Image (cartoon, grey):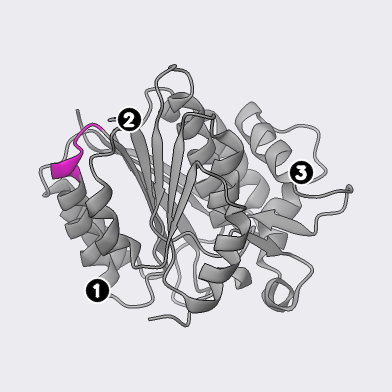
Amino acid sequence: MLSYRHSFHAGNFADVLKHIVLIQSLEYLRTKDKPFCCIDTHAGPGKYQLDGDYALKNREFDNGIAKLWQRNDLPECVARYVSLIKRFNSTDQLTRYPGSPLITKQLLRDKDRLCLFELHNTEIKLLTAEAHKDKRINVFHADGLTSCLKLLPPPERRGLVLIDPSYEIKSDYQQVVETLVAMHKRFATGTYALWYPVIERSRNQKLERAIQASGIKNVQLFELGIHADSDEHGMTASGMIVINPPWTLAPEMNQVLPWLADVLGNDGEGFYRIQTLVAE
């Protein structure tokens, strides 16, 4: 399905969590001199205008990056994230938000690579333009969930795969698990970061059980909610399921998630989860 546009949701609380985890994982890969490859299965257009019609329709960024923008008490991980977002805004006013492709691009070294997949006919044109003929970046007009398997394992034998589907249809929850299993068979040492929304908790519980039954080891879950689970609020929480996470990630999230739940939660309903789904 191609009706989903992330422009409506750019910079919301889910992006805050997703991009903090992405940045922390990439910075860990950078600690070693060896090159790495990052694969983004649902790259989107690359960047978003928060003063544009899409973002202003629901102003979801007001419950995300906007609440962090002018604060001077940010935890270290959050401060690094906000500092990176500020690179894309020429003034103190928040008007632009980079998607994961441009965030990753900022953290690539000359020897690293980025592979971007996008299926939407309009957004692939914008994404290709954002690549700016950067030799480190390859852009594919294709379904990342099915097409990225041909890139695994990467020649570098080090890397991160970011999986960020829209979950427009219920079968997406099953498909991501099947894809993760296939990816892991090809590249067992890679780090995989799977984003998920919480709209109907039973779907998430099935997703977690399926991953636990998949045979994949070393899986951690990090979740941030701004509302208590409800049938009325739409997306009340979101999370990242990370396979082969950096050893530094859980300690960092233990510091950051309680703070984010307090700052971004609505009417005191913010909450978080940190859980080892499968041990090493």
Kind of element beneath mark 1: helix
Residue position marked by numbered label 2 in the rendering: 158
Kind of element beneath mark 2: loop
Relative to residue 168, is residue 278 depicted above or below?
above
Relative to residue 124, is residue 70 depicted above or below?
above
Residue position marked by numbered label 3 in the rendering: 86
- Identify which amino acid the numbered label 2 is placed on: Arg
Closer-to-camera residue (154/81): 154
- Identify which amino acid the numbered label 3 is placed on: Lys
140 with respect to 5 (left or right)? left
Mark 1 or 2 closer to N-term?
2
Task: Work out how far the residue at label 3 is from the one at label 2, CA to CA, in angstroms.
Answer: 29 Å
Closer-to-camera residue (13/106): 106
Residue position marked by numbered label 1 in the rendering: 171
Q: Position of residue 30 (x, y in %)?
A: 48, 24
The answer to whether one can see residue 270 in this image is no
| Residue at 57% across, 42% down | 105
| Residue at 54% across, 46% down | 19
Label 1 crowding class (10 Å Cα cut-off): few <14, some 14-19, many 20+?
few
Q: Where is residue 71 in the image (x, y as percent from the top left)?
A: 80, 40
Mark 3 or 1 closer to N-term?
3
Q: Position of residue 269 (x, y in %)?
A: 57, 56
